[in-house]
Amino acid sequence: MSGLVSTAKNMFALVISRIELAALEFSEIGAHLLKLFLVCALSIVALWFALAFWSALVVVLAWESMGWKILVILGAFFTLLALGSALYVRSVLRQGRLGLPITMAELRKDRDAIL
């Protein structure tokens, strides 16, 4: 009977330990998400202003010689820029900063030890 009580006490301590680890990682995720959100918001605002001013300047300067073709060139350029940005955000998300890697590894170890 005392063995069962001891095992239950150890299991409870293990669960509490895992909950504390998950809480710590959730706080780190929150900090990473806040930083990512602020950087994305600032980047979007800056990008809109930059795109508007530079596009207008390029169109005004190139309209005499290129006409409507300058609009196609700018459209292609901005499309490539948007794709590059999307791929960067995807790579940041795939690095695993938002996926509780330490907690999941510990839970896998616990599962393997129990089974």
Image (tube, rainbow, N blue to C red):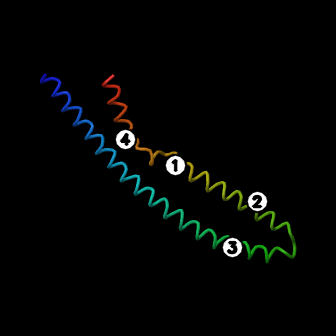
Between the C-alphas of marks 3 and 2, the distance is 15 Å
Between the C-alphas of marks 4 and 1, the distance is 16 Å
**Secondary element at tag 3:** helix
The residue under label 3 is which amino acid type? Ala
Q: Residue at x 68, y 76 (%)?
A: 53
For marks 3 and 2 on the same chain, the one whose residue lies earlier in the sequence: 3
Between the C-alphas of marks 2 and 4, the distance is 42 Å
**Secondary element at tag 1:** helix
Between the C-alphas of marks 3 and 4, the distance is 44 Å
**Secondary element at tag 2:** helix
The residue under label 2 is which amino acid type? Ala
Between the C-alphas of marks 1 and 3, the distance is 29 Å
The residue under label 4 is which amino acid type? Ile
Q: Which mark is drawn over residue 52?
A: 3
Residue wearing tag 2: 76
Structural crowding at the residue carrying mark 3, measured as other residues with C-alpha within 10 Å and reported as few (<14), some (14–19) or many (≥20): few
For marks 3 and 4 on the same chain, the one whose residue lies earlier in the sequence: 3
Between the C-alphas of marks 2 and 1, the distance is 26 Å
Please indicate whether residue 27 sits to the left or right of residue 86 in the image. left
Structural crowding at the residue carrying mark 2, measured as other residues with C-alpha within 10 Å and reported as few (<14), some (14–19) or many (≥20): few
Are the residues flagged by discs 3 and 4 in contact, CB closer than 8 Å? no
Residue wearing tag 1: 93
Residue 18, quarter of the rendered image: top left
Are the residues flagged by discs 2 and 1 in contact, CB closer than 8 Å? no
Compared with 25, 85 (above or below) is below
Residue wearing tag 4: 102
Compared with 82, 97 (above or below) is above
For marks 2 and 4 on the same chain, the one whose residue lies earlier in the sequence: 2
- Return the x and y of residue 37 as percentages of the image width and height: 49, 61
The residue under label 1 is which amino acid type? Leu
For marks 1 and 3 on the same chain, the one whose residue lies earlier in the sequence: 3
